């Protein structure tokens, strides 16, 4: 039989797709084997009705691959990408996220819908939505948008967009009705996520109705939308989040209560909270939100710098008043003994923090409008005239996303559960700082370092020594608080980085990786062997490393009460490091690192002192790891050499590669994504399967996007050329006659 065009290749392809769907069925779900029956997990995942759904996925993949030429014509059309994004968001909302926290593990959509269906007294709309309306609405919206894109039916695009918005609103209303009837503390985001997913579907329908192009140019389209009125998307997002915060979100939620803003007003009227806080709840919150929103809308529409700056200032004041009101409410409740609170910041719902994100987003929109007030609509924030290659491509989209991310980092963590607050600090935050430091060595200088965790250990043990937590105590005059140990830990890691870099300067590639790997193991084994009874051997520190304390006489800060305190300390440290490294990337040293990474011999021939440059890369990267070690030691209190094994070094390298080597945003995004994923999978799959999922994600990423999640602008320019990086440069290059090319 003809292997090129016969039946055999199709059969082989079908079997591969079906085999992949069986593997996916084994990966998805809580099923697992037992010590007495190792095949139990396989039978539960494969020999079950659920396997039919996964086999259908395999068949769809087979059809898509077999008829990829036909499929690709539709996949490239405008609206497909937001359609896929909306479907993914809705699937996450309906199958992964919680809709009602008091139900615990059964608080996801399926468990909550079962509870609603068994309660006849709940509003009919809620019972209908959690019964049949959710999947009918999802199916109709998705099919309608897809047909509108495929058949280019404008009326269907508009109709599907409107229908999707209606279903999203119904999801919010039904969830509010059900939770109001049930009571209890609920900080879930399932309904809000479903609403956002339906808005994305609506956007896909609008794009299908408005676009005349056969091929989607997503990046150009996003830039046109974001550049039409710089800051407008941020103001629009602030409007949506603000309305949710003022109307449906919980502001105060102790046991047995789930109070929105209007209910909270009556509860705290006449309480011990300050008069300003009570006034804020009564009417000031609405006035501030309307004024901030009006200023933001006027600023982004008129593109007036004074209006934009005024919006940012008013938004900042409004956020401060909101946070102060939350403190006053929680303090008054603690004094009254309501809800069992023992201090401030307890029993608060998501409403106040969601409003803070909304106000911050509106203020950020005003700031973006002020920054771009003198630029024509649609232009990039930084153009080619800046003279910095690493800044090429910085646009209103990137700056808007960065500012919105800052707002989330500031005000989302208080709404998270204690588990996720702890994970933000000990997992995500610390490894983000480590990845940013390793990015200097691997991403910018091109030096493969597999022993980076050793500097992390050095910083931790230096902190433990200076705080008196090791068997060998420092002199009394050198006994320090962890924050004051930062310069000493950085200095120790700088020296260690130079000592590692000096003998390895002649090595490259695999040889350098082996030497650095050995250095990391030497440090760990030395800590285990406990020379001179210094490290306390495999048991770790002798006593708990104290929490940081800053006592300035007139004011005293003390960390350790909860994980959020460390989160905001980590944000400050990370912001300082990222700012310094951003400036360093565009400096003469940063360009020298790039030259050494691309061709060390050519760099040396052009006058770059490669010895000095590589030593500085090792030293600066090591100092960042030492800073992370100080933070880690003071936050966890107790640690031992097992916290600094080789696997952790390899994981940090994977974070940098996954995010995009040489990219600061990429290193942050890669570390955050891959440290968040295992904790997220904790409730989704058996613990033994989590590493398998991470491996699958890495494989998919390396196959389909080898440059990383957020590739460096310089590297993107090197890979795609300036013509693929900047539209103006592309037009200029096209205007050059072929005979005059380089």
Image (cartoon, rainbow, N blue to C red):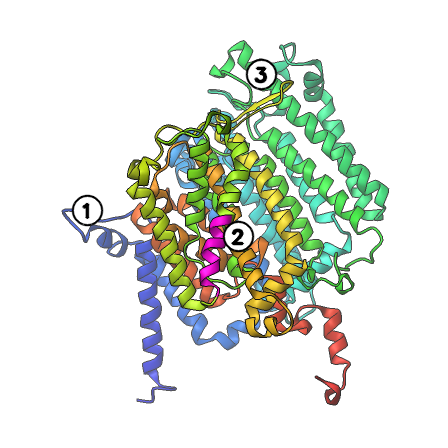
Q: Earlier in the sequence, mark 3 or mark 1?
A: 1
Whole-number angstrom distance, CA of label 1 to CA of label 2: 49 Å
Tell me: residue 323, above or below residue 46: above
For disc 3, the neighbor class at 10 Å (few under 14, some 14 to 19, many from 20) is: many
Left or right of 477, for residue 687: left
Residue 519 in sight in this render: yes
Label 3: which residue? 331
For disc 2, the neighbor class at 10 Å (few under 14, some 14 to 19, many from 20) is: many
Q: Quadrant of the N terminus?
A: bottom left
Left or right of 310, for residue 40: left
Marks 3 & 2, CB-CB < 8 Å contact: no
For disc 1, the neighbor class at 10 Å (few under 14, some 14 to 19, many from 20) is: few
Residue drawn 35% across the image and 74% down it:
13
Marks 3 & 1, CB-CB < 8 Å contact: no
Q: Quadrant of the C terminus?
A: bottom right
Circle 1: element type = loop
Label 1: which residue? 34
- Magenta region: which residues? 495-505
**Residue 17 at what x, y percent from top left?**
35, 68
Label 2: which residue? 619
Q: How many discs appear?
A: 3
Select label 3 or label 1 by which is in front.
3
Select label 3 or label 2 by which is in front.
2
Tell me: residue 118, above or below residue 145: above
**Residue 79 at what x, y percent from top left?**
61, 62
């Amino acid at each position: 039989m003809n292997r090129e065009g016969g039946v055999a290749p199709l059969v082989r392809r079908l079997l591969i797709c079906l085999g992949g769907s069986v593997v996916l069925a084994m990966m998805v779900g809580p099923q697992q084997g037992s010590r007495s029956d190792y095949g139990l997990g396989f039978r539960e995942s494969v020999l079950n009705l659920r396997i039919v759904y996964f086999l259908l996925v395999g068949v769809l993949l087979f059809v898509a691959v077999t008829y990829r030429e036909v499929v690709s014509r539709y996949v490239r059309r405008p609206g497909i990408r937001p359609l896929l994004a909306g479907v993914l968001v809705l699937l996450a909302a309906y199958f992964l996220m919680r809709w009602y926290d008091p139900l615990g593990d059964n608080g996801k959509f399926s468990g909550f819908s079962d509870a609603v269906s068994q309660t006849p007294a709940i509003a009919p709309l809620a019972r209908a939505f959690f019964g049949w309306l959710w999947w009918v609405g999802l199916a109709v919206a998705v099919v309608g948008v897809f047909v509108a894109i495929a058949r280019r039916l404008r009326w269907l695009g508009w109709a599907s967009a409107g229908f999707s918005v209606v279903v999203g609103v119904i999801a919010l209303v039904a969830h509010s009705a059900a939770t109001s009837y049930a009571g209890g503390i609920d900080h879930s985001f399932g309904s809000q996520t479903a609403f956002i997913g339906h808005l994305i579907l609506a956007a896909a329908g609008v794009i299908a109705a408005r676009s005349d192009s056969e091929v989607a140019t997503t990046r150009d389209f996003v830039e046109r939308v974001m550049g039409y009125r710089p800051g407008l998307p941020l103001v629009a997002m602030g409007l949506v989040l603000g309305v949710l915060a003022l109307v449906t979100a919980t502001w105060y939620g102790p046991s047995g209560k789930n109070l929105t803003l209007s209910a909270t007003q009556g509860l705290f009227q006449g309480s011990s909270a300050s008069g300003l806080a009570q006034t804020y709840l009564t009417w000031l919150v609405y006035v501030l939100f309307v004024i901030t929103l009006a200023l933001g809308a006027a600023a982004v529409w008129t593109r007036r710098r004074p209006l934009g700056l005024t919006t940012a200032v008013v938004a900042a004041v409004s956020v401060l008043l909101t946070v102060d009101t939350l403190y006053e409410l929680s303090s008054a409740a603690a004094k009254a003994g309501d809800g069992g609170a023992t201090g401030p910041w307890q029993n608060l719902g998501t409403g106040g923090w969601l409003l803070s994100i909304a106000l911050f987003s509106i203020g950020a929109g005003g700031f973006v409008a002020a920054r771009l007030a003198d630029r024509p609509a649609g232009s990039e924030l930084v153009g080619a005239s800046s003279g910095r290659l690493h800044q090429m491509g910085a646009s209103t989209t990137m700056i808007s996303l960065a500012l919105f991310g800052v707002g989330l980092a500031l005000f989302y963590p208080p709404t998270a559960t204690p588990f996720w607050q702890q994970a933000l600090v000990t997992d995500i935050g610390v490894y983000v700082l480590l990845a940013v430091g390793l990015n200097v060595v691997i991403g910018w200088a091109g030096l493969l370092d597999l022993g980076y965790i050793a500097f992390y250990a050095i910083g931790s043990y230096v902190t433990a020594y200076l705080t008196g937590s090791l068997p060998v105590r420092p002199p009394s005059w050198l006994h320090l608080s962890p924050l004051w140990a930062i310069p000493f830990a950085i200095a120790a890691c700088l020296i260690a980085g130079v000592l590692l870099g000096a003998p390895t300067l002649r090595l490259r590639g695999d040889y350098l990786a082996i030497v650095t790997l050995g250095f990391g193991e030497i440090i760990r084994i030395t800590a285990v062997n406990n020379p001179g009874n210094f490290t306390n051997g495999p048991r770790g520190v002798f006593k708990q490393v104290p929490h940081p304390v800053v006592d300035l006489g007139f004011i005293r800060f003390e960390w350790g009460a909860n994980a959020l305190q460390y989160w905001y300390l980590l944000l400050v440290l990370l912001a300082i490091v990222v700012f310094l490294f951003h400036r360093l990337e565009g400096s003469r040293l940063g360009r020298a690192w790039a030259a050494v990474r691309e061709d060390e011999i050519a760099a040396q021939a052009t006058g770059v002192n490669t010895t000095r440059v590589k030593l500085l890369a090792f030293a600066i990267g090591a100092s960042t790891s030492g800073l992370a070690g100080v933070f880690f030691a003071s936050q966890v209190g107790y640690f031992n050499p097992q916290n600094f094994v080789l696997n952790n070094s390899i994981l940090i390298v994977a974070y940098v590669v996954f995010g995009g080597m040489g990219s600061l945003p990429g290193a942050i995004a890669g570390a955050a994504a891959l440290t968040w994923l295992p904790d997220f999978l904790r409730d989704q799959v058996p613990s033994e399967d989590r590493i398998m999922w991470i491996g699958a994600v890495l494989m998919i990423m390396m196959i389909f996007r080898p440059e990383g999640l957020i590739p460096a602008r310089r590297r993107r320019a090197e890979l795609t050329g300036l013509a693929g990086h900047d539209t103006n440069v592309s037009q200029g290059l096209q205007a050059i006659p072929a005979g005059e090319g380089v």
